[in-house]
Every structure is written in structure tokens, then in C-alpha cells.
Image (cartoon, grey):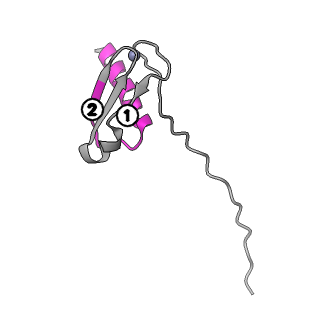
Amino acid sequence: MGKRRAAKQRPAPAKREREKYDCVVCQGRDCIEFPQFAKYKTTRVGLLVCRVCGLQWHASLCHLEDKCDLYAAWIDALEEAKGA
Ligand SMILES: [Zn+2]
């Protein structure tokens, strides 16, 4: 007879995977898209496009897992470019 520990079940916080992001260049809302993202796992090239101002940015990064990672990398690159 063993003691049964009541395992508290905590629901994992739902990860909000967004499909659209705001463009920080033209301030457009929900206009950033990831047209090549489905192929990302094979190409390792992340492409990000703004459908308002036409901006395109791509990066070959190997640590990306999500669209939000690519978006964050883009923001970082912009910040770097501003600071340079
Ligand atoms: Zn834009």
C-alpha cells in the first residue's frame, strides 16, 4: 500500500502563436507576414514581409523555432542598425 501523491495538475500556459505582427517601420498593424515560414525548417532562411510598406527582411538563423523568434530577430536587427 503506497501513499498516493495527489499531483496537482497545472494547465500549461497556452502559447499564443500569432500569425501577424505589427510593422515597426511603417507602424502598420498586423501587416507582417512570414511567407516562407513553412519551408523554414529545410531552408533555414526566415523571411519576413510587410504587406503595407513592402519591407522584406530575411535572415539565416539556426535558433529560430517560431515566428515570434524571427520577429524578435528582426526587431533586434533594426535596433542594431539604428545604433550603428
Ligand atoms: Zn511596414
SS at mark 1 in the image: helix
The type of residue carrying mark 1 is: Leu
Marks 1 & 2, CB-CB < 8 Å contact: yes
Q: Position of residue 4 (x, y in %)?
A: 73, 76
Q: Position of residue 71 (x, y in %)?
A: 40, 30
User: Is ligand 1 within 8 Å of the beta carbon of the residue shown at mark 2?
Assistant: no
- Displayed quadrant of residue 69: top left
Q: Which mark is residue 62?
A: none
- The quarter of the rendered structure image containing the N terminus is bottom right
Of residues 72 and 42, the one nearer the viewer is: 42
Which residue shows up at 28% across the image and 29% down it?
58
Of residues 65 and 21, the one nearer the viewer is: 21
- The quarter of the rendered structure image containing the C terminus is top left
Q: Which mark is residue 70?
A: 1
List the residue tagged with mark 2. Answer: 59
Disc 1 crowd, CA 10 A, few/some/many (<14, 14-19, 20+): many
The answer, for residue 63, to whether it is visible in the render is no
Which residue shows up at 27% across the image and 32% down it?
59
Q: Position of residue 60 (x, y in %)?
A: 25, 36
Is residue 63 magenta-colored? yes
Disc 2 crowd, CA 10 A, few/some/many (<14, 14-19, 20+): some
Q: Position of residue 14 (x, y in %)?
A: 60, 45
| First of labels 1, 2 by sequence position | 2
The type of residue carrying mark 2 is: Ala
The answer, for residue 8, to whether it is visible in the render is yes
Which residue shows up at 30% across the image and 43% down it?
39
Which region is colored magenta? Answer: 57-83
Q: How many numbered markers are drawn?
A: 2
Principal SS element in the magenta part? helix
